[in-house]
Amino acid sequence: MSMKNEYLLSVMEKVKQRNPGEPEFHQAVYEVLESLEPVVAKHPEYEKMGVIDELVEPERIIKFRVPWVDDNGKVQVNRGFRIQFNSAIGPYKGGLRFHPSVYEGIIKFLGFEQIFKNSLTGLPIGGGKGGSDFDPKGKSDMEVMRFCQSFMTELSKYIGADTDVPAGDIGVGAREIGYLFGQYKRLRNEFTGVLTGKGIPYGGSLARKEATGFGLCYFADAMLKDHGDSFKGKTVVVSGSGNVAIYANQKATTLGAKVVAMSDSNGYVYDPDGIDLDAIKLIKEVRRGRIKEYVADHPKAEYHEGCSGIWTVKCDIALPCATQNEINEESAKILVKNGVKAVAEGANMPSTPEAIATFQKAGVLFAPAKASNAGGVATSALEMSQNSQRLSWTFEEVDSKLHGIMENIYKNAAQAAKDYGMEGNLVAGANIAGFLKVANAMLAHGVV
Ligand code: NDP
């Protein structure tokens, strides 16, 4: 952590002053700016035209009240957010997160990361993110529906198929997207691809549900292959048990690995025989239950309270797929001591800066989220293309495009790192490759 460039340091200082009490946003910005040092040294035009000053300031922040009525007839009030961060290369695109921890700083960090991730996909999508401090956990379907309708009543004023296209994230899955889409259609009297992650009967893309987890493994596989290795015969730990985690497990298993542990926010399960993914899908996707229920039918498996303990499970490959900052320095040191060979991030910013430094110092192959979890948004962009064409592609067609996109992201990030004298550093490579396209588009547009 030692940025020296005066221009970048001054931008960072301003970010901290203008966005007090938002440590996740500061962390995300610092990581990108640090990677850009050799870029601004080589290209003074970015400083001259204030590109980075503009980049760290969202184009628009929308914050709104979301009132709804619970099953007891009581009025509840939540907060809604949509941050339209950067539209230099396409309409704003990024998920909605419903989780009690959501506040402006979380949405800002996610929206900022999204700019570079979307650029890396090679598709024409800008960066945005949104969400609410609403907690879908423990709510009835009708409560979730009323909340989503109220949320969309306000959000619908600011989004559109060519303006801003939200998708899912933590706490926003097929059920929530369905209610949100239904309300948008009712309010606007139009059937357009205004959301992605939609159900298949009403314009969703095959393979979107699987895309982030599958894409993560395609990226990790490309990284491993580049170092003469693969998933075959490896022991893998996947944190989380939501959308990303489930399909990361599925693809890692298909590629020949054994996933021995998964978690939720309460604890983790360890199964030496390999996690029975159908059981996890039943508990999490169908019953909306807790992961500890797994041990009831799996006598050899163990359940441990506390989700961070999952990183003490010995593995060759770690795939953090739950939430931000879930691997700290201590957990990273344990993983290294236990012989981890590769870490690929499925969640957004799951490793703290100290954890990343620990992996890099130990020579662990490290795939940063911006690059390795871009498969979800890439497939969302493919869903937008299908909606525009009024066509649906087959699962195989979408999956094969996703595979190609992830391999390209790996190649481009690895090449950018090499070009700027940081060979093997995919954190820097992904930040630089993602930045250049957006920055050049901003330069072309002038100061706007
Ligand atoms: P889900 O809501 O489907 O699943 C989230 C999982 O992570 C659950 O197992 C949840 O446990 C766990 N989790 C959530 N918050 C915490 C926490 N504070 N501490 C510990 N565990 C937690 O979300 P997704 O799978 O969609 O998202 C997971 C990550 O992947 C997020 O970082 C998201 O931003 C990122 N991502 C998602 C994409 C997508 O396409 N869905 C695309 C790119 C990135 P519990 O059930 O107990 O809450």
Image: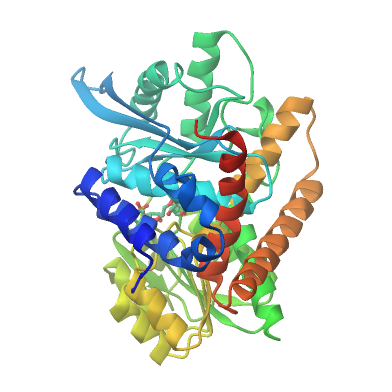
Q: In the image shown, does 107 or 426 lie closer to the viewer?
A: 426
Q: In the image shown, does 23 or 215 lie closer to the viewer?
A: 23
Q: In the image shown, does 55 or 248 lie closer to the viewer?
A: 55
Is residue 324 in view?
no
Q: Position of residue 180 (x, y in %)?
A: 48, 25
Q: How is the image coloured?
A: rainbow
**Residue located at (40% from left, 25% from top):** 148
**Residue located at (60% from left, 79% from top):** 423
Instruction: Reply above or below: 317 against 239.
Output: below
Instruction: Reply above or below: 408 against 68.
Output: below
**Residue located at (71% from left, 64% from top):** 407
Is residue 154 in view?
yes
**Residue located at (65% from left, 51% from top):** 121
Q: In the image shown, does 295 or 219 lie closer to the viewer?
A: 219
Residue 290, image quadrant: bottom left
Residue 151, image quadrant: top left
Q: Position of residue 357 (x, y in %)?
A: 39, 79
Q: Quadrant of the N terminus?
A: bottom left
Q: Position of residue 21 (x, y in %)?
A: 19, 49
Instruction: Reply above or below: 23 against 395.
Output: below
| Total marks in image | 0
Q: Position of residue 44 (x, y in %)?
A: 52, 57
